[in-house]
Image (spheres, rainbow, N blue to C red):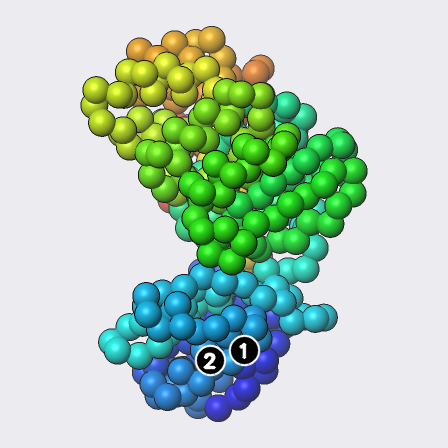
Amino acid sequence: MLELTEYLEKAVKSNASDVFIVAGSPVCQKLDKRVCPINKEDMLYPQDAEQLITDLYKSAKRPMDLFLHKGDDDFSFSIGGLARFRVNAYRQRGSLAAVVRIVAFGIPNWQEIGIPEQVMNLADESHGMILVTGTAGSGKSTTQACIIDRINNTYERHIITMENPIEYLHRNVKSIVSQREISIDTEDYLSALRACLRQAPDVILLGEMRDAETIHTAMTAAETGHLLIATLHTKGAVNTIDRIVDSFPSEQQGQIRMQLSMVLRTVVSQQLLPDINGGLVPAFEVMHMTSGIRGLIRDGKTHQIDNDIARGGADGMISMDNSIVGLYKAGKISKETALDYCDNLETVKRKLN
């Protein structure tokens, strides 16, 4: 069996996104959505997996007590000259296991990774709520980091981030960036958000909105002159808005729709598609708030928002299908991929022909 650092070095050199440490299998890596062994001969027994996970905690200089008590844990650490690593440790079948996400040092170049200018221009907003959404592993954290990096390099502001764990490290450039890690620097998202409002923030990055109380506090922060950027594990603007409203009891939903229609500025939804070179490329949906969409949210007619997005090119909006068609016409994805990932199959078929 290799040492932990040897597995991580091999994964970084292979451009893997994740490393899997699970008893009953070799240590594996994810390459472009495929999981494969790093070294086929190294079958892990429970004691081997436990040793590797103990080494992860030693690398992070983090005690294992909380993990052994709760059964799961999130943390991150760096290896100089190699990369940063985001770890989720957990129990399975009575043994210890972990998934290690590889995060490159430094903030990626937004143009090289395919983030649209419409998304990067969100850095110019001064207040309101911006939501970056998508499934797990769709690149939400990277998009957020690029927006924060542009703010940091452009404006003199106080930026406070609340993350679990911290992935990208921001150095102070024109702004002061305070990065708080949940369970290390603060107890939880809600406590951190409430405290943040007493720390003179201009920009707040909230790693996740998990419950109604956190969502309500976030909307209040956005109402009171702060720019709040948050993530949700949803696909598309319509699903995102419905998820927020449905988090509240039915008797409060009318009030929440009204409040959300006033504070929401933009919903960015993204997914990663296989490209023609065997890698991954992002596709984006961008919904900007207009008076029409504000009325649809307020009146509970969110199912009509997709039509406004499709017609909203002049307002800087992008539908997911138009983004996918653009990737195909740019020669970045195959026709089969475009049809597999689109929302409206017949419409996209016509646009591809």
Residue 206 position in % (x across, y down): 50, 40
Identify whether 241 is placed above or below 94.
above
Say if residue 68 shows up in the picture. Answer: yes
Q: Residues within 10 Å of mark 1 (few under 14, many from 20)?
A: few
Q: Residue at x 42, y 13 (%)?
A: 294
Q: Would you say the residues marked 1 and 2 are in contact, meaning their CB atoms lie under 8 Å apart?
A: yes
Q: Regarding mark 1 in the picture, which secondary structure is present there?
A: helix
* Viewer-nearest residue: 116 or 249: 249
Would residue 110 be found to the left or right of residue 338 on screen?
right
Q: Residue at x 74, y 38 (%)?
A: 175
Q: Residue at x 62, y 53 (%)?
A: 168
Can you identify the residue that label 2 sits on?
54
Identify the amino acid type marked 1: Lys
Towards the viewer: 200 or 300: 200
When asked about the image quadrant of residue 51, the answer is: bottom left
Vertical relation: 280 (above or below) 262: below
How far apart marks 1 and 2 lie (CA) works out to 6 Å
Q: Which residue is mark 1?
A: 58
Left or right: 159 in relation to 211: right
Q: Residue at x 54, y 63 (%)?
A: 76
What is the three-letter code of the residue carrying label 2? Thr
Q: Position of residue 352 (x, y in %)?
A: 47, 33
Q: Nearer the viewer, residue 155 or 194?
A: 194
* Circle 2: element type: helix
Residue 23 point in image, percent of width and height: 34, 81
Work out whether 205 lies above or below 317.
Answer: below
Is residue 320 depicted above or below 259 in this figure? below
Q: How far across and how far down the image is residue 133, in percent?
A: 45, 38
Can residue 353 be seen?
no
Q: Locate residue 236 relative to residue 248 in the image: left or right.
A: right
Rendered image quadrant of residue 166? bottom right
